[in-house]
Amino acid sequence: MANRKILVDNAGAGPAVWTASLDTTGQLNLGDAALGAVGSWVLQVSGTFSGSLVLRKKVIGSIVADASAPTTHYENSATNVAVAAGTAITGAGLFKVPCDGCVLILDYTATSGTMLVESVNILG
């Protein structure tokens, strides 16, 4: 099955939450974190999987292909430590990705199983 993202209806209880189901090698464009404002994505990674997720960003409206977008740094929320751009996520965790005026791309390499990525956009 192809990678896909689904908007979770939270009945207006807060910001929109997207659930991405990654089980195929390829890219999935999450979009803009804050509709052009200063914002970030918070990602909760879970599931039973063997694979790796590299985070990429590009400027809103860019013609650069998702697979060619530059890799980006992120923060591991469990340790509050910044992680270098291009470092793959290979296990469960909570991560924050600054994304001002850009779109976030999930670049997944599948081995087995399905990685679930719940994502919420936050302002500021």
Image: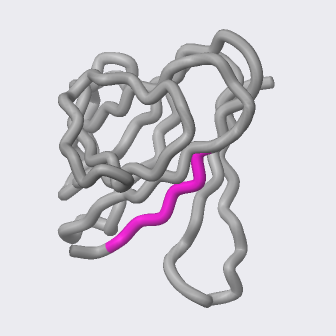
57 over 100 or under it: above or below? above
Q: Residue 42: give x, y in percent of width and height.
A: 41, 58
- Residue 112: quadrant of the picture: top right
Which of these two is toward me, 88 or 122?
88
Residue appearing at x 53%, y 52% in the figure: 44
- Most distant residue in the right direction: 1
Image-based side of 62 in relation to 119, left or right:
left
Which of these two is toward me, 91 or 18?
91
Q: Residue 116: give x, y in percent of width and height.
A: 66, 42
Query: Is 18 in the magenta?
Result: no
- Residue 36: quadrant of the picture: bottom left
Residue appearing at x 49%, y 45% in the figure: 93
Image-based side of 42 in relation to 24, left or right:
left
59 over 94 or under it: above or below? above
Residue appearing at x 25%, y 26% in the figure: 71
Magenta span covers which residues?
117-122
Residue 25 seen in the current view: no
Which of these two is toward me, 70 or 73?
73
Residue appearing at x 71%, y 74% in the figure: 9
